Amino acid sequence: MADSQRANDVAAWKALATHYQQIKDVHLRQLFADDPGRGERLTAETGGIYLDYSKNRITDETLRLLLQLAQERGVAQRRDAMFRGEKINLTEGRAVLHVALRAPLGARILVDGHDVVPDVHQVLQAMAAFADRVRGGAWLGHTGKRIRNVVNIGIGGSYLGPEMAYLALRPFSDRSMTFRFVSNVDGADFTEATHDLDPGETLFVVASKTFTTLETMTNAATARQWLVHALGSDAAVARHFVALSTNTEAVGKFGIDTDNMFGFWDWVGGRYSMDSAIGLSTMIAIGRDGFRDMLAGFRAMDEHFLTAPPERNLPLLLGLLTVWYNDFFGAETIAVLPYSSNMRRFPAYLQQLQMESNGKHVDLQGHSVDVQTGPIIWGEPGTDGQHSFYQLLHQGTKLVPCDFIGFCRPLSPVAHQHDLLMANLFAQAEALAFGKTAQELAAEGSPPFQTPFRVTEGNRPSNVILADELTPFTLGALVALYEHSVFTQGTIWGIDSFDQWGVELGKVLAQRIIPELTASAQPALHHDGSTNTLIQRFRDRRRAR
Ligand SMILES: O=P(O)(O)OC[C@H]1O[C@](O)(CO)[C@@H](O)[C@@H]1O
């Protein structure tokens, strides 16, 4: 990719714009009628993850042009640069090496001439030794009780991955232990997470890359007070707090013994960190072997992304399809619909991964982009979503491409319900694609006055990701699939998918407003008229009952 070239300057983008005009009114019914083999052909598979992308509004020509776009935008070169440890996060001058977190011992990845792989494995070993002690009852609390509760305190990437993974992998976790997650600075979050816990049996895992994040530091201080008050001694902190961070100094200042700190590095982005030390709660839940399997899943997808031919490369295809709808069809959102109750936080996890990475308005040269960048990600598990928002997916006026995610084998012992669950997934993808016409309805005896309301146009695209079983390995592979899809999109758009400057302004303004809310004397308010009035109303009424 020529450095200054813009996404829509390259030949493939222009060809796709023309091609879109030819294909935009072609129905998926037609595409399947013309090409009955596409349901088998437009698929790709690796490590037990099967992607059926045949229900997309594409032809072989679309695919050819999308793959050409990837080539012209230098996706493979940038991918290789990322895996080599080059500083592709330009605005922060950092390498982007979440792939090093799952590199096998013996691999060599250099950052500023230093091989980071042994460091990764050293931390993994320390995490495993600690997880063993907690799980085995060798790590005791201050009063000599065994740890039975683990509370992860963190937000954003220091929370969404751990909570999502814990819920996803519940069948593999130690069910005698309780795991909770506190993220919100709303005190209710802490209260709800701890109200029924015995402090003597509770371990707080304070997860923060920077160890400066307002929400996490506030909740950690509250946790500390709660614990010290209950156990009657500051000395209890050493047995009940561990830290996951890159900031040793701040961890020490907080009063956590830095021997009980598990580190990582600035080349791990927060939203790419669930397989770093940030995964300690996951490792305590599923054990060192489960965590190792999860890393193996990540690694399998990394290797696939690196080596699979473009036309069979799952993350590349998923990323290119996202660009296709986002930039050519003008679709603003993507619905992520896991048919798995255990995967219920996966859409929230992907929101940060995708939207914090690709919600950018300037390119790598600092110029305003003139194409649409990251889509809005949302979703809920099926079948729940079907009884909520699917009406709009089927008959609304907006195009919402969907990612359905399902598993061939259930892990729940209530296995007989799994066929019902999966029947719904297949049915929804089918209904979205093919719909039901007025003629079909009439033939079925629909009363004529109802027919227009009952017509479902179809031609609504989806991917179906069908994995064998929701194991740690599968989860790792699925997360890596989306990580590399996000990377692919960001490279096509020419943006920095690894910074997050947009979240800073709100943080700065909140710091200014905090004393205006807490001051007992009336502060002078110098905001806009709306903000001043809101602050004043809050001050006047917060103590009123
Ligand atoms: O792990 P930390 O440093 O507490 O940051 C938490 C989250 O805050 C953010 O910086 C956004 O505010 C995310 O990128 C990050 O995952």
Image: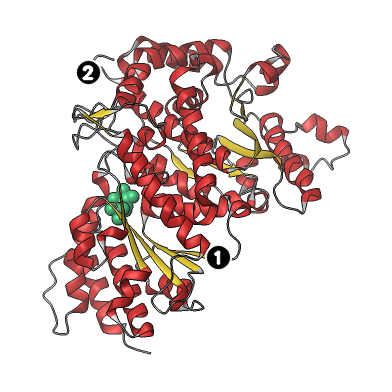
Picture layout, residue 520 above or below residue 304: below
Crowding around mark 1 (Cα neighbors within 10 Å: few <14, some 14 to 19, many 20+) is: few
Q: Which residue appears at 43% of the width and 70% of the height?
A: 140
Marks 1 & 2, CB-CB < 8 Å contact? no
Viewer-proximal residue among 119 and 360: 119
Where does residue 349 sit, x and y in percent of width and height?
Answer: 46, 47
Q: Which residue appears at 43% of the width and 35% of the height?
A: 483
- For the N terminus, the image quarter is top left
Q: Which residue is mark 2?
A: 3
Viewer-proximal residue among 389 and 150: 150
Q: Which residue is mark 1?
A: 177
Residue 483: numbered disc: none
Asked whether residue 10 appears in the rendered view, the answer is yes
Where does residue 268 sit, x and y in percent of width and height?
Answer: 31, 41
Q: Is mark 1 within 8 Å of ligand 1?
A: no
Disc tally is 2
Viewer-proximal residue among 126 and 215: 126
Would residue 249 be found to the left or right of residue 58 on screen?
left
- For the C terminus, the image quarter is bottom left
Where does residue 131 sit, x and y in percent of width and height?
Answer: 45, 56
Type of colouring: secondary structure
Q: CA distance from mark 1 to mark 2?
A: 52 Å
Q: Looking at numbered disc 2 in the image, what kind of residue is underneath it?
A: Asp
Q: Secondary structure at mark 2?
A: loop
Which of marks 2 and 1 precedes in the sequence? Answer: 2
Q: Looking at numbered disc 1 in the image, what kind of residue is underneath it?
A: Met
Would residue 171 be found to the left or right of residue 502 on screen?
right
Would residue 35 be found to the left or right of residue 373 on screen?
right
Picture layout, residue 50 above or below residue 212: above
Quarter of the view holding residue 211: bottom left
Where does residue 254 sit, x and y in percent of width and height?
Answer: 23, 67
